[in-house]
Image: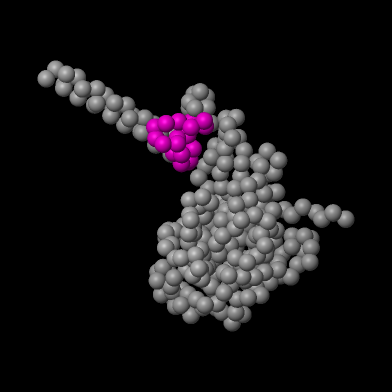
Amino acid sequence: MRRRFIALMATIAVLLCVLQEASATAQFSRQYDTPCNTCHTAFPKLNDVGMAFKDAGFQFSDEDVSFIAIPRTLTKPAVVSHSTKLSYQRPEYAAPPSSIPDPALRSLQQRYFKELTDVGAQINALPFPNRFYLSPALNVGERTQKHPDQTSLRFATFNGETVLEVTGNYYAVYPRERMDANERIQRTFEDVLLPILKILISRFPNDAPVHGYVLDISHRVRGRVLGVPFRTTENVALALSRDAAEQLAAAKNRREQQAVLGQVHVYRNAQPIALRLADEAP
């Protein structure tokens, strides 16, 4: 009886320790707006960042705080379905009409479903410098999806206007120490966003009732947190009218592109920024 009592008390003590540690983990996660896996592998085990965080007195530097924060998306996050389609079947790139709650937008999605899927196939065929796939959700790990859901293209409302949304994950990894945020965003703009925009302009029907486009793409950034290697995602978004999109697609150089960007809303992790394109070499 005594042994059972001691064992029970030991179990209760362990549970209390785990609960206290879990509470502390949630507290730090909320305080620094970062996911629990920033510091933990399998809870409660600490990873290298977690060990460094503990050694630093449970504090991150101001510079690290922005780097580890959960990256926000401009578009509404979508739930990724686990596709069971076989590899020889033709993938779909348009979101199912049933997934769109607004009746008018759902009707548009139904009407232009084939055109959207054809546009998605054209985007998927682009020769991006790094792997890219259309996805209804951003910040999806490359290794976690054997059959990624690519139903990305969908009609939506942005600032009261009907737009065509395109979302996807780009697996370029940019070094934080050698490329600042503007340089990273410019690279993704030129390598991914602009080619996609040109496909939309040239392939999507001109008579479709679309006022503009919203493109939201995630890329990867590697750096260090408390001296420990760390990798995160960064979301880049463009929101622009159809006229601005046509002008941007037709621009012949960076100077002309920069002039059009004055009519384009550019976002980094859902926060508006001013994208500055580097001058072209003479």
Q: Residue furthest right?
A: 282
| Secondary structure mainly formed by the magenta segment | loop
Q: Is residue 197 above or below residue 130?
A: below
Display coloring: one colour
Residue 79: tell me if it is visible. yes
Q: Residue furthest left?
A: 1
Q: Residue at x 67, y 49 (%)?
A: 184
- Residue 91 at what x, y percent from top left? 51, 68
- Residue 191 at what x, y percent from top left? 68, 58
Q: Is residue 183 left or right of residue 35?
A: right
| Residue 37 falls inside the magenta stretch | yes
Q: Which residues are magenta?
A: 32-50
Quadrant of the snapshot with the N terminus: top left
Q: Residue at x 42, y 63 (%)?
A: 84
Q: Residue at x 35, y 33 (%)?
A: 23
Residue 59: tell me if it is visible. no
Q: Is residue 159 above or below residue 229?
A: below
Q: Residue furthest top?
A: 2
Quadrant of the snapshot with the C terminus: bottom right
- Residue 127 at what x, y percent from top left? 67, 62
- Residue 226 at what x, y percent from top left? 57, 30
Q: Residue at x 28, y 29 (%)?
A: 15
Q: Is residue 152 above or below residue 37?
A: below
Count of marks overlaid on the render: 0
Residue in the foreground of this view, choosing between 218 and 28: 218
Q: Residue furthest front?
A: 88
